[in-house]
């Protein structure tokens, strides 16, 4: 079913507003909070789970596999925290550069 002329006009207005707003995509993207403490906990958990995996190899391969899955999960969590911390650091650098450029050239 085709859109009416009124609906098409409304859709064009919305598209024009979206094209004019450069921060729209950034506003929609979810922010991830990362902390160094969470990263340290995740890495420590991964190392401990890997050590437990090695120790459990002599007891039961199934328990060792479960410990390996725990280590894998901890590494994935650590990677997400590293990525979030990296994103936050990149945002801080971009903001610092933007404010420094504004201070040097106030006409910008």
Image: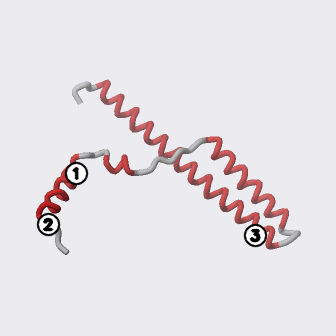
Q: Tag 2, which secondary structure?
A: loop
Image coordinates for residue 104, horizontal then vertical, percent: 30, 25
Q: Judge depth for marks 2 and 1 and give the one in front.
A: 2
Q: Tag 1, which secondary structure?
A: helix
Which residue shows up at 57% across the image and 49% down it?
81
Image coordinates for residue 93, horizontal then vertical, percent: 43, 37
Q: Disc 2 designates what residue? A: 4
Q: Tag 3, which secondary structure?
A: helix
Query: Badge 3: how crowded within 10 Å, few (<14), some, or many (20+)?
Result: some
The answer to whether the residues at label 2 and label 1 have Cβ atoms under 8 Å apart is: no
Identify the image's colour scheme: rainbow, by chain, secondary structure or one colour.
secondary structure
The quarter of the image holding the N terminus is bottom left
The residue most toward the bottom is 1
Quick check: 45 left or right of 3?
A: right
Image coordinates for residue 28, horizontal then vertical, percent: 38, 50
Question: Is 47 in front, or is 26?
Answer: 26
Image coordinates for residue 56, horizontal then vertical, percent: 84, 65
The residue most toward the right is 59
Q: Which mark is residue 65?
A: 3
Marks 2 and 1, how far apart at CA: 23 Å
Sequence order check: which comes first, mark 2 or mark 1? 2
Sequence order check: which comes first, mark 2 or mark 3? 2
Quick check: 30 left or right of 38?
A: left
Marks 2 and 3, how far apart at CA: 60 Å
Q: Judge depth for marks 2 and 3 and give the one in front.
A: 2
Which residue shows up at 24% across the image and 30% down it?
108
């Amino acid at each position: 079913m085709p859109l009416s002329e009124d609906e098409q006009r409304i859709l064009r207005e919305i598209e024009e507003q979206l094209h004019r707003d450069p921060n729209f995509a950034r506003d929609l993207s979810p922010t991830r909070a990362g902390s160094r403490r969470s990263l340290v906990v995740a890495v420590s958990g991964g190392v401990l789970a890997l050590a437990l995996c090695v120790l459990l190899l002599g007891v039961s391969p199934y328990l060792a596999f479960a410990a390996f899955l725990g280590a894998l999960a901890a590494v994935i969590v650590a990677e997400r925290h590293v990525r979030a911390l990296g994103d936050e650091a990149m945002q801080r650098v971009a903001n610092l550069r933007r404010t420094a450029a504004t201070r040097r050239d106030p006409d910008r």
